Each structure stands twice: as structure tokens, then as C-alpha cells.
Image (spheres, grey):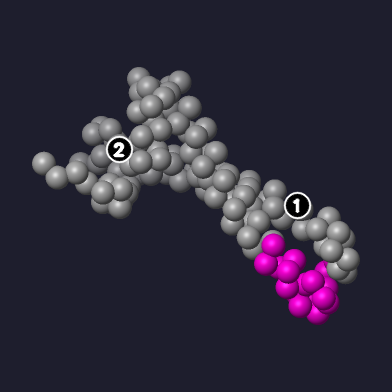
Amino acid sequence: MRTRSLFERSQDLLRLKATWRNRIALFTAGGFIAGAMLAASWAYPLQLALGLTPGAPAGSEPGGLSFLAAMIFGVLILGFLGMALGALAFSALLTGLTPMTFRQSLRAIFLSYYPRDWFGA
């Protein structure tokens, strides 16, 4: 039997029962939003540290585009880190509330090895 690639297994997300899809989305999207908000909270201090006028249009001052690039990079990196932490929290919750082991829950959430009973009819 041929081993399915991670991409092929990730397509199984579309075949999951809506409750499981929504639970996964809730934790990962919540993690992304939390990480992005953390990065956004650093915008004002970073502007002051770079000597920029807060609220000035991007690129209107020297260093403005560097600030913009740093913020975009920071939002993405912290957002994806937040998604990973949200998925890790969901894995821990699954371990506590279902008969799954922590390893099984990590494989389900991070590697798309979903249990059979998660799939809809």
C-alpha cells in the first residue's frame, strides 16, 4: 500500500465532520489572532525606537519602509507561532477530554492523521 503524502492527508481536513473542522479552526485562528495582536502591540514602541512619528504615512520618513517590513514580518511570524501554540493547546485538550494519547492528538492536529470517527458520512 502506498504511503500518502502530507499534502494528500491535509486534504482530509475538507472531509472531516464540521464540528471537528470548526474546533481545529477555532484554536488555530485564535492563536493567529493572538500572535498578530502581540506583534501589533509592539508597533508604537518600535516606531518611537526608530525615531518615526507615530501615525505618519509609511515611507514618508527615513526608516518608515523598514518599520513596515518589520511589522509585516512580525505579524506573520508571531501569527504562525500563535497558530502552532493554539494547535498544541488543542492537542493537550484532546488528550484530557478524549481517549487519545498526546502523541495521537499531535499526529492528528499537526500531521493530519485523523481518527476514523472524525470523518462525516
Asked if residue 82 lies left or right of residue 95, the reply is right
Where is residue 13 shown, x and y percent of the image? Answer: 32, 47
Mark 1 surroundings: few (<14), some (14-19) or many (≥20) residues within 10 A: few
**In percent of the image, x 35 and y 28: which residue is there?**
104
**In percent of the image, x 30 and y 43: which residue is there?**
16
Question: Height in image: 83 above or below 100?
Answer: below
Where is residue 102 shown, x and y percent of the image? Answer: 41, 25
**In percent of the image, x 43 and y 41: which residue is there?**
24
Asked if residue 119 lies left or right of residue 79, the reply is left
- Dot label at residue 86: none
Whether residue 20 can be seen here: no
Give the amino acid type for the residue marked by disc 1 in the picture.
Ser
The part of the chain drawn in magenta is: 54-70
Question: Residue 65 occupies which quadrant of the picture?
Answer: bottom right
As for residue 19 lying within the magenta part, the answer is no
- Dot label at residue 41: 1
Image quadrant in which the C terminus is located:
top left
Give the amino acid type for the residue marked by disc 2 in the picture.
Tyr
Choose the circle earlier in sequence order: 2 or 1: 1
> Disc 2 designates what residue?
113
Which SS class for mark 2?
A: loop
Whether residue 114 can be seen here: yes
Q: Nearer the viewer, residue 32 or 1?
A: 1
The reply to whether discs 2 and 1 touch (Cβ–Cβ < 8 Å) is no
As for residue 62 lying within the magenta part, the answer is yes
Mark 2 surroundings: few (<14), some (14-19) or many (≥20) residues within 10 A: some
Which SS class for mark 1?
A: helix
Question: Height in image: 105 above or below 9?
Answer: above
